[in-house]
Image (tube, rainbow, N blue to C red):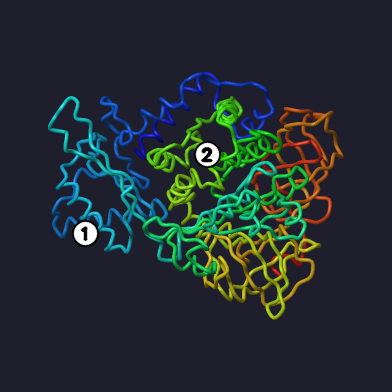
Amino acid sequence: MAIFIQQQQRQNKRHKTKSIGSPDPMDAFLGLYDNGSDSDDDDWISQFELADPLASNNNQQKNLPPEPQSGNIEYKLKLVNPSEQRIQHLVTQMKWRLREGQGEAIYEIGVGDDGFLHGLSRSDMDASLDTLSNMARRLGASVTILRRRSLDATDNEVMADLSVAEVLVRKVPDDQRSIDLRVAVLGNVEVGKSTLIGVLTQGQLDNGRGLARLNMFRHKHEFQTGRTSSVSHDILGFDSSGQIVNYEQATTAEEICDNCSKLLTFIDLAGHQKYLRTTIRGLTSYSPHYVMLIVSGTSGVVGTTREHLGLALALEVPFFIVITKQDVTRPQVLADTIQHLETHLKSPGCNKVPFRIETEDDVITAGAASLSETTVPIFVVSSVTGRGLNLLTKFLHLLPPGWGALEREKMEQEPVEFQIYETFCLPQVGTVLGGLLTQGVLTENMNLLLGPLEDGSFHPVQVQSIQRHKSSCRIVRAGQSASLALNIELPNIRKGMILADSHLKPQATLYFQATIVVLFHSTSIHKGFQTTVHIGSIQQTAVLEGIMAAKHIVTNDTASVLFRFLQHPEFIRTGSRLLFRTGSTQGIGKITQVFPIEIDSCAEK
């Protein structure tokens, strides 16, 4: 069940570590440019047949790992006619599990605390599920039975009527309208990214000529060429029972938000090599919880697919793969595409376990393991016939939030830091900034500092109003994206700036030190080398001012270097991830030290 597969993956990872070593994210990205192939010859299908007792008829598999003390998974042997005092204790326990899972909890019914699958009779199971529903109602939560399976009675006929069940309990946190997730959509050009998003969000199948993708385009040339060149968004909701809420059921985005308990924001990114800088910026700026990598069944792993896969690995974002155009792909070609994908995923550079999704049981198993470092679900769909879309939407419904409760609380207690990745100037509104709140809690009428400006200073501003998903709200919490209207208009506001609480005492910097890995460069890199650097929402040319303990670096080298922003100072933090690219030159790294510039009129002004 949910927790068992997580332990199985950790065991698999430990076994692999003995032979190939534990990959660093930099090494994982680097490995994509190595022609080495299979890391192991084990049958990945057999691993998952053993990993899911509810979906398997294997008589020997009767146990789960012991119940975890933390997390959002709870084992219950039975919940038959509990006393009122017991009910209150169970409700308190459920509240804690929901808090651990950011509004979602998984209950395994008929399972002992030691993980043994005892099973329950039909009457006891029905009574236990009724009790669970009663507990959820007291918290204002909803209950969805994910699956219910009978235990194998081959050895013991008494077990013939015994069953176990897996139940999803969901409650939207009191301070939120819905549980929010951001899913970045990557893939090569013309693989059907925008078309698939259009089908999911509009509720209408494509006509085979790209009709569904028109809603995702923002510019005239995108309509003319059929190619995405910018970053666009659309939303898909699910109600408390798991039913889809999209533009087929609602007419506006606000109506979708009002009627859903879980909301996914798709971030549609460009696939053409020409717009790779825009894609990288969108991926680093929006901090997605997941990446949906789209691969065409007809063309396979071509173009920027490998590069996009490398970006997901370098940024350590959990990802899953969707193979499109099943309706026009010959079976042998589709099989070759899947085999090619599996080879890439199991190579030393990725060290992943591909998991092909074919049934609803596979979906539930994959959903429970979606935050895993090793599992990569693979879906095969058609946006024209609709085949496979039911499995994909159910998987999206089951995707857990990315942050844990403790991490979220810690980030909310920090001073406000809002990263800007969109700027607008609207009539009768003024300056509007779109971005991501990386830490703190932001409210209306809050006084903040905007910067750094060209001279490195920060200007005081006030947040007049807030919108999320095209509807007004009064509060934004860490990890949420929003649009903010300011009380004044300032010239030269750019992407990459921040809004910060004065207690943060933000300081701009021109110079910073980083440890980098050169993924590819045709010759050697020396002092004075210029490249485009991506750090969160920041995208700017930087000059290499020095290489520590070396005169130059080449492909595959790791070095500590000193960079200088070429145009204007930025606000960056130690530990931030760094991507740089110029032409065919590529590299990744992590910032180790920043050197603030001294300005008398900075944050204290």
Which residue is most to the right?
Answer: 528
Q: Residue 363 location in percent, x, y? A: 42, 41
Mark 2 vs 1: CB contact within 8 A: no
Of residue 340 and residue 399, the one placed in the foreground of this image is 340
Which amino acid type corresponds to the residue marked 2 in the rendered image? Val
Which amino acid type corresponds to the residue marked 1 in the rendered image? Gln
Residue 587 relative to residue 156: left or right: right
Q: Secondary structure at mark 2?
A: strand
Q: Residue 200 location in percent, x, y? A: 53, 54
Image quarter for residue 446? Answer: bottom right
Determine the CA span between mark 2 and mark 1. 45 Å
Q: Residue at position x 70%, y 50% from top?
A: 281
Image quarter for residue 149? Answer: top left
Of badges 2 and 1, the one in the foreground is: 2
Q: Secondary structure at mark 1?
A: helix
Q: Residue at position x 57%, y 44% from top?
A: 292
Which image quarter is the N terminus in? top left
Q: Indicate whether 602 appears above or below 41.
A: below
Q: Callout 1 environment at 10 Å: few (<14), some (14 to 19), or many (20+)?
A: some
Q: Which residue is mark 2?
A: 380
Q: Residue at position x 76%, y 28% from top?
A: 555
Query: Which numbered circle lies on residue 497?
Result: none
Of residue 82 and residue 546, the one placed in the foreground of this image is 82
- Of labels 2 and 1, earlier in sequence is 1
Of residue 224 and residue 230, the one placed in the foreground of this image is 224
Q: Residue 392 location in percent, x, y? A: 48, 46
Residue 105 relative to residue 262: left or right: left
Which image quarter is the C terminus in? bottom right
Q: Indicate whether 451 appears above or below 30.
A: below
Q: Which residue is mark 1?
A: 88
Q: Residue at position x 36%, y 45% from top?
A: 70
Q: Callout 2 environment at 10 Å: few (<14), some (14 to 19), or many (20+)?
A: many
